[in-house]
Image (cartoon, rainbow, N blue to C red):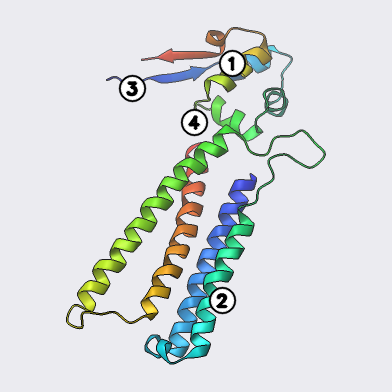
Amino acid sequence: MPKAEISNRIRRLRFDNGEMTQEELAYRVGCTRQTIIAVEAGKYVPSLSLAFQIAKAFGVPLEAVFQYEE
Amino acid sequence: MTPLQKRAWLGLGVGVGMSLAIAAVFIARGVTSFDDDLVLRAIAYVLCVGGLLVYAVTLRIKRRKPGRSEVLIDERDKEIVRRATMVQLWAVLLSLFIWAIALTEAYWSQKSIPIVFVYLIAISGLIVSILAQAVGILIGYRRMR
């Protein structure tokens, strides 16, 4: 089975949303800043619930934030 | 540093401290004197129960800052703890098997083991448990950073 990678555009979306800080995003979605850093760097894959909350914070669909690549 | 990382460092300190304390006590008073030495037995009880209590206190973690809505513990922290608990479980199991094999081989001819080892197994189990969880948490944060 090929290894799947989940990439994200959080950094870009933060920039496009008035240069939102990682701390502000963390506050909006109810997690820690360290988790946002880890997700953004691709070191941690968030739960479906957190992924939806992140997309909601940017006002975009989930697939605009996270991409599944085989 | 997250509250869990602080707890892990504290756990590492408690574990190393307990290891040094127990080693110092048994080196100073001698392992074989345990059966007749009431002071040594009292110290072993205190280290065993005291260590467990100190560790229990460190398990209390605030999830949010008092009076603020800022989150201190989230799903990533819980995932790290879950993985660290597996490390802890395997480390304790491994230590128990090492004790069992080592004592069986060492006391095979006598068909019995000195009672002091019951305490040493309990204390070492506690120390291994504390250290393994702390190391598991610290490695978890290092990987998911």
On screen, B85 above or below B15? above
On screen, A25 above or below B6? above
Distance from disc 2 to disc 3, alpha carbons, whole Å, reads: 51 Å
Amino acid type, callout 1:
Phe
The circle on residue A43 is: 4
Q: Provide the chain ID for the residue under circle 1.
A: A
What residue occupies the far right of the structure in this picture?
B67
Q: Provide the chain ID for the residue under circle 2.
A: B
**Circle 1 or circle 4, nearest the eye:** 1
Q: Is disc 3 in the same subunit as disc 4?
A: yes
The residue carrying pointer 1 sits among few (fewer than 14), some (14 to 19) or many (20 or more) residues within 10 Å by Cα, namely: some
The answer to whether the residue labelled 3 contacts the one labelled 4, judged by CB atoms less than 8 Å apart, is no
**Circle 4 or circle 2, nearest the eye:** 2
The residue carrying pointer 3 sits among few (fewer than 14), some (14 to 19) or many (20 or more) residues within 10 Å by Cα, namely: few
How many circles with numbers are drawn on the protein?
4
**Circle 1 or circle 3, nearest the eye:** 1
The answer to whether the residue labelled 4 contacts the one labelled 2, judged by CB atoms less than 8 Å apart, is no
Q: Label 1, secondary structure: give it.
A: helix
Q: Which residue is mark 3?
A: A3
Distance from disc 3 to disc 4, alpha carbons, whole Å, reads: 15 Å
Q: Is disc 1 in the same subunit as disc 3?
A: yes
**Circle 2 or circle 3, nearest the eye:** 2
**Circle 2 or circle 1, nearest the eye:** 2
The circle on residue A52 is: 1
Q: Provide the chain ID for the residue under circle 4.
A: A
**Residue pictured at 54% horizontal, 83% vertical:** B42
Where residue B78 appears, x then y in whole percent? 55, 38
Distance from disc 4 to disc 2, alpha carbons, whole Å, reads: 43 Å
Where residue B74 appears, x then y in whole percent? 61, 34
The residue carrying pointer 4 sits among few (fewer than 14), some (14 to 19) or many (20 or more) residues within 10 Å by Cα, namely: some
Q: Which residue is mark 2?
A: B46
Q: Label 2, secondary structure: give it.
A: helix
